[in-house]
Image (cartoon, helix red, strand yellow):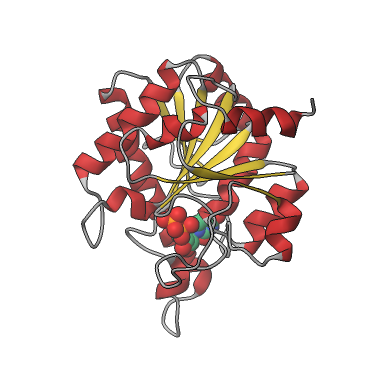
Amino acid sequence: MGESDEVRAAVGSEGPVLPFPRVLVKVSGEALMGPEPFGLHPPTVSAIARDLAALRERGCEVAVVVGGGNILRGARVAGEDLARPTADNMGMLATVMNALALEQAVEKAGVPARTMSAIAMPSVCEPYARQQALRHLRRGRVVILAGGTGNPYFTTDTGAVLRAAELDCAAVLKATNVDGVYSADPKTDPNAVRYEHLTHDEALARDLKVMDAAAFALAREASLSIIVFSIRDAGAITAAATGAGRATLVSP
Ligand code: UDP
């Protein structure tokens, strides 16, 4: 059985299987916002942190890339008076704020965590360095990766795929507001069909928006599996990692 068959079999199966020794979880800024219109919702941050801690306690090494859209998106605020690279730097700083909140919440849930930022700010958190991140992961720490790729014009989805490839993660668990990838927007189209499994090529051919184009191109290039699932239910991250939840698997 090939690697992708194993992943498919594991994700499709019931029960407490841990198919992935190491995963990268992408948590958007919006997921941390909970019911609020902006910023952080502490009970939601704590619930996500408990889920990450539970996954770690089940033996999976956990890296996390956090977004910043609950605070600032560069493309949205850039304009005549604010250059896009500056606006994007502000967006990357927003991800650091989220990462620090999540780091503390994971520690409160009883699992050691380390924030590493692509933009060096050593008095606040560690600068991202691959070898050091791998060391933390092997020692059982949840590694929270802030600052996206460290470059403007990118998104934290691209940062998630990049770090997952660099850190040899078996899959990217992409937490969203819907329980997978649909043929059309399920909020507006009652005939939208949810896919259980897609290949990267199928997602491209059907023009399905799994991630933004740069992120998806990198995932395809790196043959990285992506699991798209809804963060809304308690324990959703662990469920996605064990194949117990509703999700779409995108694999080579
Ligand atoms: N950003 C960036 N480079 C990156 C990652 C993020 O410039 O590699 C900036 C960009 O302005 C983006 C913001 O940070 O809008 C917040 O990230 P993102 O929109 O991906 O957050 P999410 O939608 O996941 O909350």
Query: Is 66 or 18 nearer to us in this picture?
Result: 18
Looking at the picture, tell me which residue is in the foreground, 141 or 226. Answer: 226
Evaluate whether residue 227 shows in this view: yes
Left or right: where 48 falls relative to 25: left
Q: Quadrant of residue 210?
A: bottom right
- The residue lying at 35 percent from left, 55 percent from top is 30
Spot occupied by residue 29 in the image (x, y as percentages of width and height): 37, 53
Q: In terms of depth relative to the viewer, which is nearer, 61 or 72?
A: 61
Q: In this view, does 216 lie to the left or right of 122?
A: right
| Residue 31 position (above or below residue 112) | below
Instruction: Using the image, determine if residue 133 lies above or below residue 98.
Output: above
Q: On the rendered structure, is 108 left or right of 99?
A: left
- Quarter of the figure that contains the N terminus: top right
At horizontal 29% and vertical 39% (from top left) the residue drawn is: 101
Q: In this view, does 138 lie above or below 244?
A: above
Furthest residue to the right?
Answer: 2
At 57% from the left edge and 40% from the top edge, which residue is drawn? 172
Q: Is residue 168 visible?
A: no
Q: Residue furthest bottom?
A: 80
Q: Which residue is drawn at 39% across and 59% down?
A: 69
Q: Nearer the viewer, residue 156 or 189?
A: 189
Q: Count the labels in the image.
A: 0
Residue 211 rendering spot, x and y as whole percentages: 58, 57
Q: Position of residue 221 (x, y in %)?
A: 77, 49
Q: In this view, does 153 lie above or below 217?
A: below
* Residue 12, horizontal then vertical, whole percent: 58, 33
Q: Quadrant of residue 27?
A: top left
Quadrant where the image shows the C terminus = top right
